[in-house]
Image (cartoon, helix red, strand yellow):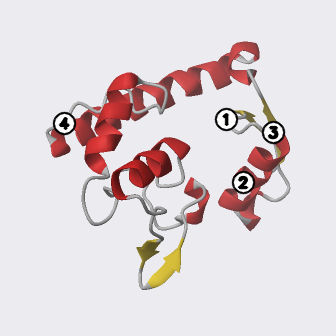
């Protein structure tokens, strides 16, 4: 089977986002075309619908994180003042909180301002790595 996968590119580099999708899908999908463009959610109704579903799911996950931490983390976007305040609280320990995306400039800056040190390297399964993008964590549930 073949077809076309359409996605709203949520990376500034549309081609890089397309390749991340291709890698994530693996060999079973190698014959499929991938169209990934900015603002595709406003051009294609099915992509728009998927975008809404993803946003609802994301908002629910952010709400769950707020509840788990007993802390209002706002929208979870780095430009949100509530999120910025939460980040400052979540870097105030030996390592940044597990729910933070350590690669965010907002998190790195808060860590450096709090500890006067560069952000530590995240460790997973005994390996030392820096989380630069979500696709580096292949064992994470989606």
Q: Residue at x 60, y 55 (%)?
A: 133
Residue 86 image position (x, y, % from top left): 29, 37
Residue 29, located in which quarter of the rendered image? bottom right
Q: Nearer the viewer, residue 4 or 60?
A: 60
Q: Distance from label 1 to label 4 (Cα)?
A: 27 Å
Is any atom of residue 45 visible in this view? yes
Q: Distance from label 2 to label 1 (Cα)?
A: 11 Å
Q: Distance from label 1 to label 3 (Cα)?
A: 8 Å
Residue under label 1: 10
The numbered mark, 2 or 1, whose residue comes first in the sequence reads 1
Q: SS at mark 1? A: loop
Label 4 with label 3: CB-CB less than 8 Å? no
Q: Nearer the viewer, residue 26 or 70?
A: 70
Label 2 with label 3: CB-CB less than 8 Å? no
Residue under label 3: 14
Q: Residue at x 36, y 31 (%)?
A: 83
From the image, state whether disc 1 or disc 4 is nearer to you: 4
Q: SS at mark 4? A: loop
Residue farthest front in this picture:
116
Residue under label 2: 20
Q: Any mark on residue 71, and which?
A: 4
Q: Distance from label 2 to label 4 (Cα)?
A: 32 Å
Q: SS at mark 3? A: helix
Q: Distance from label 4 to label 3 (Cα)?
A: 34 Å
From the image, state whether disc 2 or disc 4 is nearer to you: 4
Determine crowd level at label 3: few under 14, some 14-19, many 20+ residues with C-alpha closer than 10 A: some
Q: SS at mark 2? A: helix
Task: Please tell me whether residue 86 is drawn above or below residue 115 in the rendered image.
Answer: above
């Amino acid at each position: 089977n073949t077809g076309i996968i359409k996605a709203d590119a949520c990376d500034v580099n549309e081609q890089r986002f397309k390749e991340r999708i291709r890698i994530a899908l693996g060999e079973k999908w190698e014959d499929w075309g991938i169209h990934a463009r900015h603002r595709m959610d406003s051009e294609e109704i099915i992509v728009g619908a998927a975008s809404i579903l993803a946003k609802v799911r994301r908002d629910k996950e952010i709400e769950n994180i707020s509840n788990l931490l007993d802390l209002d983390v706002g929208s979870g976007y780095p430009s949100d003042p509530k999120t910025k305040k939460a980040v400052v609280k979540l870097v105030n320990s030996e390592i940044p909180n597990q729910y933070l995306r350590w690669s965010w400039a907002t998190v790195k800056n808060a860590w450096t301002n709090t500890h006067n040190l560069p952000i530590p390297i995240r460790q997973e399964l005994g390996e030392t790595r820096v989380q630069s993008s979500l696709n580096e964590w292949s064992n994470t549930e989606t």
